[in-house]
Amino acid sequence: MTAPIPREIPDLPAVPGPPLLLPAPVPATAVVPPVRRPLVAIFRLLTALAAAAGVALELLLGTPARTLSYFSVQTTILLAVVMLLSASRAWRARRPLPSSVTGATLLYAVITALVYHLLLAHTTPPFAMTDATAPPARWHAQWAALQVLHTVVPLAAVLDWLLLTPAARLHLRQAATWLLYPLAYLAFSLIRAAFIPPSTPARYLYPFLDADAHGYRHTLANALLVGLAMYALAVLLIALDHTRPTPVRRGA
């Protein structure tokens, strides 16, 4: 038999102090619906077209098998696809691509520019993606293709990140994952050269990965140094992404 319910229940004492609001685990992007950004879509579409034009020009100047083997060409194709998808999402007010994808694309674009301008632009013999032995003449087709792939497109990717992409979307845990593709490319480059006759010119696509000239020990040491620099660059981009201001949307 249950006890009778009392007619009067005493009031509970008030909780002292203001109510504590716990941080919500749901990000703001999951609550605030995306808006249509036509100017952003146009810029990203133009970037994708520039990347595709640079790759197409290199394919016309060289052999497709060799051209498509370059790191810069592969990453430019990736950037063109990512920019095209991002342009479509910005135009249709869809949620942006995952930061793991856009961050990796940004990192590869910056690597492409830095490696070319710091390690390849002034080499002897001159670096080229074709069989040419003379330096590319300024404003000629090969020079223009190199500038589009290694300067124009990476610069557009950086501007899109700084001016059109919300801040604090990159995370430190993504940095190591982004290096899986460069590691796979190193293996691809060395395996590719092993199946090409030694007398073939430009058997190795990049001079610092030339095992014939440096030996495998020094080549792998060069690759390790480049890999450490890539990881440091990835960490730097993530740190900058968390310190830069979020771009203000002005009717974009």
Image (tube, rainbow, N blue to C red):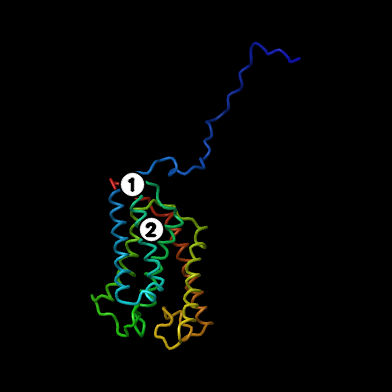
Q: Label 1 amino acid?
A: Arg
- Residue positioned 48% across, 81% down in the render: 195
Outermost residue toward the left?
Answer: 139
* Residue 217 locus on image (x, y percent): 54, 82
Q: Where is 26 relative to 192, above or below?
A: above
Outermost residue toward the top?
Answer: 7
User: Which residue position holds label 2?
Assistant: 82
- Residue positioned 65% across, 11% down in the render: 7
Tell whether label 2 touches label 1 (CB within 8 Å). Answer: no
* Residue 200 locus on image (x, y percent): 41, 86
Q: Where is 231 relative to 205, above or below?
A: above
Name the one closer to the observer, 28 or 40.
40
Total tally of numbered discs in the picture: 2
User: Which residue position holds label 1?
Assistant: 92
Sequence-first disc among 1 and 2 = 2
Instruction: Name the image quarter holding residue 116.
Output: bottom left
- Is label 1 in a helix, a strand or a loop? loop
Q: Is residue 199 left or right of residue 36?
A: right
* Residue 183 locus on image (x, y percent): 50, 70
Name the one closer to the observer, 100 or 13.
100
- Residue positioned 29% across, 82% down in the render: 135
Q: Label 2 amino acid?
A: Val
Could you classify mark 1 by the number of other residues whose Cα lies within 10 Å: few (under 14), some (14-19), or many (20 or more)? some
Outermost residue toward the right?
Answer: 1
Location of the N terminus by quadrant is top right
- Is label 2 in a helix, a strand or a loop? helix
Instruction: Name the image quarter holding residue 42.
Output: bottom left
In space, the residues marked 1 and 2 are separated at their CA atoms by 15 Å
Could you classify mark 2 by the number of other residues whose Cα lies within 10 Å: few (under 14), some (14-19), or many (20 or more)? some
* Residue 109 locus on image (x, y percent): 38, 65
